[in-house]
Amino acid sequence: MNEQEKMYHSISRIGAGNIALGVLVLVTGVVTGVLAIVNGARLLASRKNILL
C-alpha cells in the first residue's frame, strides 16, 4: 500500500467518524429538545395546583 492509499483510507475513516459524531450530536439535541418541551408542558399543567 503506497502513501496515497494510506492517506485515502485515513481520510475515509475520519470522514465516517465525523458523520457518526454529527448524527450522535443531532440525535442528542433532538432528544434534549423534546424532553425540555415535555417538562415545560408538565410544569405549565401543574401550575394550577400551585397557584391559589
Image (cartoon, rainbow, N blue to C red):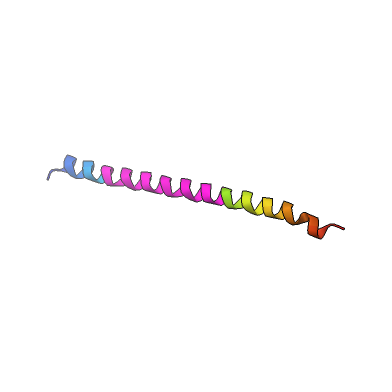
Position of residue 33 measured from the top left corner of the image (x, y, whole percent): 57, 48
Q: How many marks?
A: 0
Q: Which residues are the magenta region?
A: 11-33
When asked about the image quadrant of residue 15, the answer is top left
Q: Is residue 27 left or right of residue 35?
A: left
Seen at 43% across and 49% down, the residue is 24
**Residue under the image location 52 percent in, 50 percent down:** 31
- In the image, residue 44 lies at what x, y percent? 73, 51
Quadrant into which the N terminus falls: top left
| SS assignment for the magenta stretch, majority | helix
What is the residue that sits farthest to the right in this orientation? 52
Depth check: give the residue in front, 46 or 23: 46
Provide residue 35's location: percent of width, then percent of height. Answer: 58, 53
Is residue 51 left or right of 38 when viewed as pictured?
right
- Lateral position of residue 37 relative to residue 6, left or right: right
Which one is nearer the viewer's eye here, 28 or 1? 28
Q: Which of 14 and 21 is in front in this view?
A: 21
Give the quarter of the figure containing the C terminus. Answer: bottom right
Reply above or below: 28 against 11: below
Left or right of 51, for residue 9 = left
Q: Give the residue displayed 37% in from the left and 44% down from the top.
A: 19
Residue 21 is one of the magenta-drawn residues: yes
Residue 20 included in the magenta stretch of the image: yes
Q: Which residue is drawn at 62% across and 51% down?
A: 38
Looking at the rendering, which quadrant does residue 22 occupy? top left
